[in-house]
Image: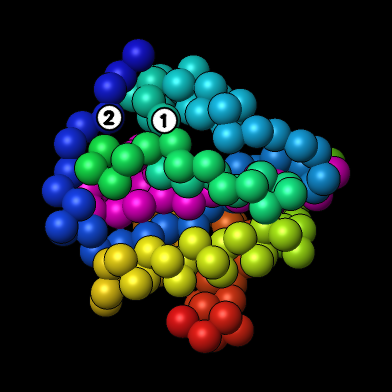
Amino acid sequence: MGAPAYMDPKKITDITIHCAATPRGKPFTAAQISAMDLARADLGNQIAYHYVIELDGKTTQTLRHDQRGAHVGGHNTGNLGICYVGGVLEDGKTPADTRTDAQKVATAALLKQLRAQFPGVRIRGHRDWPGVKKACPSFDVAAELKRIGL
């Protein structure tokens, strides 16, 4: 099991939003998402995200801000990862914005808190990183930031 590397929390420059790619409405806990990460050799068998937002809006911090996650290959230093449960339709394959209202409220609150803590931080979706060929987080983060006033 890999331990997360240290990163200087004073040098946080990015926040990346992800989906867990779990089927719409299927409950998963932050502990289950972290356990799936720990089982993945391609992630270095470590927890990927700093925060997980469950279907009911419960937000769990799974890594400290001084721990480097494993969520955007080659771009994890200075980058906090937020993952919401869901992101695909019931078929388990088709990308879709499956966030519940509670998840939307929790995500907005967390982003506002983190933007206040890390002024000037860039917020984007996983798919918005150069070279990423995934639909994750299955919604337009820039549009969402405008909607919530960030």
Horizontal and vertical percent position of residue 67: 26, 38
What is the C-alpha distance between the residues marked 2 and 1?
7 Å
Kindly identify the residue that appears in the image at 21 percent across and 32 percent down: 5
Q: Total marks drawn?
A: 2
Q: Amino acid at mark 2?
A: Pro
- The answer to which of 24 and 102 lies nearer the viewer is 102
Q: Earlier in the sequence, mark 2 or mark 1?
A: 2
Horizontal and vertical percent position of residue 104: 66, 65
Horizontal and vertical percent position of residue 42: 40, 27
**53 sits to left or right of 71:** right
- The answer to which of 116 and 37 lies nearer the viewer is 116
Magenta run includes residue 121: no
**14 sits to left or right of 45:** left
Kindly identify the residue that appears in the image at 61 percent across and 26 percent down: 32
Magenta run includes residue 80: yes
Callout 1: helix, strand or loop?
A: loop
Callout 2: helix, strand or loop?
A: loop
Q: Contact (CB < 8 A) between labels 2 and 1?
A: yes
**22 sits to left or right of 24:** left
Q: Which label is found at residue 4? A: 2
Q: Residues within 10 Å of mark 2 (few under 14, many from 20)?
A: some
Q: Residues within 10 Å of mark 1 (few under 14, many from 20)?
A: many
The residue range painted magenta reads 69-90
> Is residue 92 visible to the viewer in this orientation of the structure?
no
Kindly identify the residue that appears in the image at 32 percent across and 40 percent down: 64
Kindly identify the residue that appears in the image at 80 percent across and 47 percent down: 24
Q: Which residue does the numbered mark 1 point to in the structure image?
A: 47
- The answer to which of 65 and 129 lies nearer the viewer is 65
Horizontal and vertical percent position of residue 22: 70, 40
Q: Amino acid at mark 1?
A: Ile
Location of the N terminus by quadrant is: top left
